[in-house]
Amino acid sequence: MAEITSDMVKKLRDATQAGMMDCKRALVETEGDFELAKDYLRKKGILKADKVSGRETGEGIVYSYIHHNGKLGVLLELNCVTDFVARTEDFKELAHRISLQLAAMGARYISREHVPAEKIAKEKEIYAEQVKDSGKPAHIVEKIVESKLESFFKDNCLVEQEYVFESGKTVNDLIVELIAKTGENIKINRFVRWQIGESDN
């Protein structure tokens, strides 16, 4: 059993903003593994998020980000339950971080649920065509196609993308962390991203 020191607890608290007792419990449960302890706390946050996920999000903000060169811009609608949370610095900071993600990585959809069925079918058709002459059995080909489709979702769906400024964390993790902190449901409602020279297609 690893010894859990006060410095370890403080480090985890500083990294996650979770309570001291929660941090200590997470470190005990994961035998002092810092990254596993963060995952443990994140999962606890997800549980809290699940409890509020059905609450209507009628408040929020429209956040705009224009890159310093004036050639790229993002407009984001981020929703929450109360105007009180919408006016907090934490909420505005989340909107800013998501907007930077959009500027850097150019997601096309909010989540996989927003990808049109015909687009998914077309992608699967392309992936199947790519491996049809590989000589692999049909069930292996199917697994390869599904794996490629998962990669497509992670590349193109905003909430599934890895957060560009923190390896190992997704955009959804950022949202869940603030849900856990505020106790309110938070969701991305819509966004647009414009870049000089790009078409809408």
Image: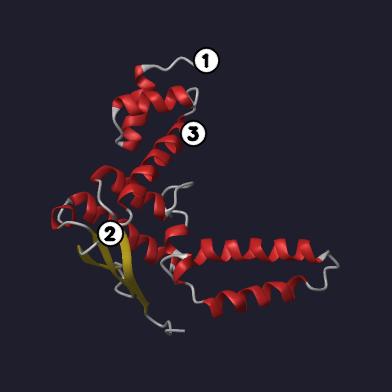
Q: Residue at x 42, y 84 (%)?
A: 200
Identify which amino acid the numbered label 1 is placed on: Met
Q: In the structure shown, which secondary structural element does the residue marked by tag 1 occupy?
A: loop
Which mark is drawn over residue 1? 1
Q: In this figure, which residue is indicated by the disc labeled 3?
A: 36
Q: Quadrant of residue 13?
A: top left
**Classed neighbour count for the residue bearing mark 2: other residues with Cα under 10 Å, few (<14), some (14–19), many (≥20):** many
Q: In this figure, which residue is indicated by the disc labeled 2?
A: 95
Identify which amino acid the numbered label 3 is placed on: Leu
Q: Is residue 145 left or right of residue 10?
A: right
Compare marks 3 and 1 and give the one earlier in the sequence.
Answer: 1
Q: CA distance from mark 3 to mark 2?
A: 27 Å
Depicted 23 relative to depicted 117: above or below: above
Which mark is drawn over residue 13? none
Where residue 163 appears, as percent x and y from the top left, is 43, 53
Foreground disc of the pair 2, 1: 1
Where residue 58 appears, as percent x and y from the top left, is 21, 64
Q: Quadrant of residue 150?
A: bottom right
Q: In the structure shown, which secondary structural element does the residue marked by tag 2 occupy?
A: helix
Foreground disc of the pair 3, 2: 3
Compare marks 2 and 1 and give the one earlier in the sequence.
Answer: 1
Q: How is the image coloured?
A: secondary structure
